[in-house]
Amino acid sequence: MNASTLSLSAMAPTAGPANLPAGTAPRQASAAASEVVAHPAAAALAGAAAAARAATSSSTADVVLREQGAALARAQRRRALAKVLAPAVGFALFLLLWQAVSLAGDKQLPGPAPVWEAAVKLFSDPFYSNGPNDQGIGWNVLSSLQRVAMGFGLAALVGIPLGFMIGRFNFLNQMLDPLISLLRPVSPLAWLPIGLMVFQAANPAAIWTIFICSIWPMVINTAVGVRQVPQDYLNVARVLELSEWTVMRKILFPAVLPYMLTGVRLAVGTAWLVIVAAEMLTGGQGIGFWLWDEWNNLNVAHILIAIFVIGGVGLALEALLMAIARRFEYA
């Protein structure tokens, strides 16, 4: 080997990593990384970490949901407790005030305890009968309810159809509106002498008074309900050439029913209020007459019992009508 050959050999590149083609080194690094990721132990560790994170998130969500459910349950319990506790507190305060008033002054007003004792004795036999002027409180309440049912029923038969017609026909509305506005504020007792003069008897006069006083809420509320029906409904009925009876039955009645039931509820309260005042003046049999008779006997405990009975019956009538209104509520 000569000198030129040795020099050429020294100048030739040596095979090694520094002399690999371009791009070979990154591919090898990527392959090495892939081998690390693809290693079974590394994959297991990654899966365990992901599972731990998912479990942590799931447990956190469960804790939040449980806390929200517990808070909702506590709020519901507080509302239920307040619904029971608030009336009880109010009634207790009323009894304390009543007791304080009964102990003050000349002490003619009996306290809660004597009235309770009288009520227990009175309701032990509420349906006794010792003649037309000496009957138990039960018979008197039933007599009043019978008059209310008759007067209120007649008022409903007249007032509800009249309200439909007033709301449906503008001319009828303009004709009767001044008359209703004039007669509606008249005191119930002002109508009683007219009934006594016309019927010449106390019982029909009381029924007449109930009728004329309880008709106005039904007329007015029914008429307002009819006027609240959208005009588009009536226009469609006119285009379809529906009869007036079909319009009343299919369009007006479902829309007016909530207004009508509100008028009925107000009317029955008015009727029960009127009958007590009418019976106090006409006499005979009824809770109003019984109350006035106990006043003539200076039995204040029975007067207070009559007040609670009148209020309780009125509350029961209103609750009954509210239940009926919810039953026939349209969605």
Image (cartoon, rainbow, N blue to C red):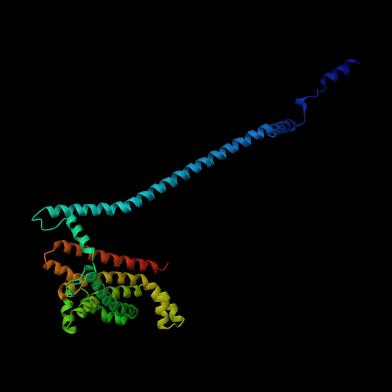
Q: Which residue is more in the foreground, 256 or 174?
A: 256
> Where is residue 29, by image quadrant?
top right
Q: Is residue 1 left or right of residue 323?
A: right
Quadrant in which the C terminus is drawn: bottom left
Q: Residue furthest right?
A: 1
> Where is residue 216, by image quadrant?
bottom left
Q: Which residue is more in the foreground, 73 or 30?
A: 73
Q: Is residue 310 left or right of residue 24?
A: left
Q: Position of residue 205 (x, y in %)?
A: 20, 79
Residue at the image point whose x is 18% and y is 84% from the top: 198
> Where is residue 280, by image quadrant?
bottom left
Q: Is residue 262 above or below residue 208?
A: above
Q: Is residue 268 above or below residue 24?
A: below
Q: Which residue is more in the foreground, 41 or 23?
A: 41
Residue at the image point whose x is 25% and y is 77% from the top: 211
Q: Is residue 313 visible?
A: yes
Q: Position of residue 78 (x, y in %)?
A: 35, 49
Q: Position of residue 56 (x, y in %)?
A: 54, 38
Q: Is residue 314 above or below residue 82?
A: below
Quadrant in which the N terminus is drawn: top right
Q: Is residue 186 visible?
A: no
Q: Residue furthest left?
A: 106
Q: Position of residue 119 (x, y in %)?
A: 21, 61
Q: Which residue is more in the foreground, 21 or 212?
A: 212
Q: Is residue 47 left or right of residue 131?
A: right
Q: How many marks?
A: 0
